[in-house]
Image (tube, rainbow, N blue to C red):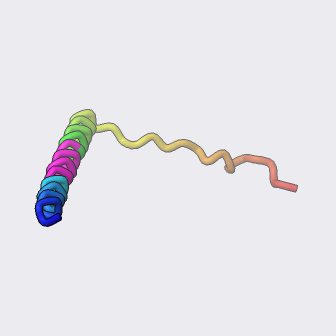
């Protein structure tokens, strides 16, 4: 039983480390994509598209 407990502990530690590495990789990829998006948007100088809400000029409810 002692060996089993040791191996389970080691596996739990390794799994936690792997999860942390995967989380860091996902966060880095997300940050890189966001940076690229904002750099491209700044280069284009595009302002966000504003869509009318559809309420202006609409007939009153009732």
Does residue 11 lie above or below 44 as drawn?
Answer: below
Q: Main secondary structure of the magenta part?
A: helix
x 16%, y 50%: residue: 18
Q: Give the quadrant of residue 14.
A: bottom left
Magenta span includes 44: no
x 15%, y 62%: residue: 9
Quadrant that contains the C terminus: bottom right
Q: Is residue 42 visible?
A: no
x 18%, y 53%: residue: 15
**Along the horizontal axis of the image, is 46 left or right of 19?**
right
Magenta span includes 19: yes
Q: Which residues are magenta?
A: 17-29
Q: Is residue 27 visible?
A: yes
Q: Position of residue 60 (x, y in %)?
A: 81, 54
Q: Give the quadrant of residue 17.
A: bottom left
Q: Position of residue 54 (x, y in %)?
A: 66, 45
């Amino acid at each position: 039983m002692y060996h089993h407990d040791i191996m389970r502990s080691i596996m739990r530690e390794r799994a936690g480390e792997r999860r942390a590495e995967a989380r860091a990789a996902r966060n880095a990829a997300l940050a890189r994509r966001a940076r690229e998006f904002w750099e491209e948007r700044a280069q284009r100088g595009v302002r966000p598209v504003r869509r009318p809400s559809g309420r202006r000029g609409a007939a009153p409810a009732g």
